[in-house]
Amino acid sequence: MAATLYLLGCLLIPAQTPTQPPGLAPRRTVSSFNGDWLLVPRLRRSQELVYGGTFTEEGRGGSVQFSRSYRLESRILVLDTPPNGAEVAVLTLLKHRAAIGATPPEAPAKGAAGGGEAGLVSVRLERMNVDLQGKLSAEPNVNLLVPLDAAPTLECGVFIALPGGRIGMGQEWTVLEGDRPPLTWRAVGAEMVAGTNCIKLVGEQKSEDWDHPRGDRSAWQRRETVWLAPQFGLAARLEREILQREPAQREPGQRSRLRLELESAFQLSGQAGDSRREEVNQVLAFRDSLTPLLKQPERYGPNLNALRRRIEQYLENQPESPYRPAIFQIKRRIEAAQRGETPPEPVSDIRPVATGAAVGQRAPDFIASNFSDGGSVQLRRWMGKPVVLVFFHPEAGTAPAVLRFAQQLLAKYPQRIIVAGMSISDKADLVRRQQAELGLTFPLLSAGGLRGSFGVASTPKIILLDGNNIIRSEHLGWAGGETAREVEEELRRWLPVGVSLPPMPQR
């Protein structure tokens, strides 16, 4: 504990190795903090900060009930400090909390593709810039928005966009975040965290209809509480709560909570700093080499093999660092792409725990936004006909073939089945463009928040429901005609009896 207090108070004094504190001191109100505070990021090259905490989510709305808990670690390495701010690398690790302290039978061995990390379900490393007011920016393809309906795969909440100049008690300012409503911050006081005087900030963001529920639209509210350490201008503690409410409801049906605290902050020596920066750059180079290959993995098989060999050679010859899991994650994506099972975005690495989506049980009801017409769709309204749910990622190489097959099914059994495309990506423009290019007539829904309810660890995944919304079969991956035949054979078992069926295609 003494080491942590020293580090928080004297970050400009270099240290060779981090110190892990046994815990953080309880917070208490600090009455001696009066007047205004000058809050700006104070970062140094080769500085590293490690945050640890938990993320929990639960749903109690309708027939969808679930509860999940994760251990989250966010590691920040300062790569450089140009005059206009700092260049940083942010590594986020997400683990199932049930696996903490235990090694499940399926956990990879040390040195395998999983790096021997029990329960590790997501790894994300990104490079970004933070300006002199704490605002983050990154490459256009890096989404910095806080996810509203899933665990964060890239956690950057310890960086706070500040208004500039001095901040006084009760002062408010707003921050724009994409096409979402503004995030409003307010300085509410000062409290002690781990022996350090911190400025307490509260941020609130909510959908326009949160205060006035509507029957045709879901609503949400996000609340951030941050204890900002003036010594370095980043959070010493972060708490986040997101509430979601179904249409026509006044009580939230889904709630998530994030709690994150600074565990260590230290200055790396010259050689140690150089080594970690080199590993970060190597991870990003491997990732950039992989990205174009994922668009057509079946075409770039030799390139994928060559890249995997380069990674294996690097792993054998270079010493490990805390950023090694990101390399293992890239290797896993290569192997999955060679099987035709992975979308290109790291968000697909989340492997949620299935919560009631077992074959033979009733599918959890849901209300999902419809990309096709801007409305929403509720599953239970489709009862009476078999339903084919096609979970896909619009940028995956297998997506066009799977969606064409779904369209063929609908054309073959008109008015007798329901087909729905379940996109795990919320890139609406991309989904609509794909719908137009493929001539799809069935609805394409926003299904990123349903991955846990239906146990979707990777895509494509086709789930077949009978007329009572009972799950009858699940088909993971895409093997062309073989998968198509399996799905149709199962579908024909649950079509209404007494209706003549078209002949099955010959093998």
Image (tube, helix red, strand yellow):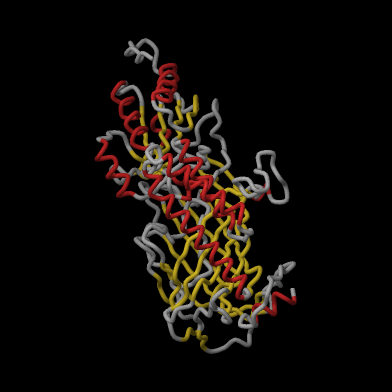
User: Residue drawn 41% across and 34% down?
Assistant: 390
Residue 129 sits in quarter = bottom left
Q: Nearer the viewer, residue 45 or 255?
A: 45
Q: Is residue 419 left or right of residue 336?
A: left
Say which residue appears at 35% left-offset and 25% top-offset: 417
In this view, the residue in front, 315 or 250, is 315
Q: What residue is rendered at 48% in x and 69% in y?
A: 203
Residue 250 location, x and y as percent?
46, 52
Q: Position of residue 89 (x, y in %)?
A: 51, 66
Q: Is residue 487 left or right of residue 10?
A: left
Tell me the quarter of the picture where residue 257 sits: bottom right
The furthest residue to the bottom: 35
Horizontally, residue 259 falls left or right of residue 62, namely right
Residue 397 position, x and y percent, is: 38, 40
**Could you tell me residue 297's position as x and y percent?**
40, 40
Q: Which part of the image, by quadrant, shows the C terminus?
A: top left
In the rendered image, the quadrant that contains the N terminus is bottom right
In this view of the protein, can residue 211 be seen by the observer? no
- Up-down relation of residue 486 to residue 247 (above or below): above
- Image mark count: 0
Quick one: 14 or 415, which is closer to the camera? 14
Q: Vertically, is 429 above or below 211?
A: above
Vertical relation: 292 (above or below) 204: above
Q: Is residue 256 above or below residue 415?
A: below
Is 442 placed left or right of 339 in the picture? left
- Residue 371 visible? The answer is yes
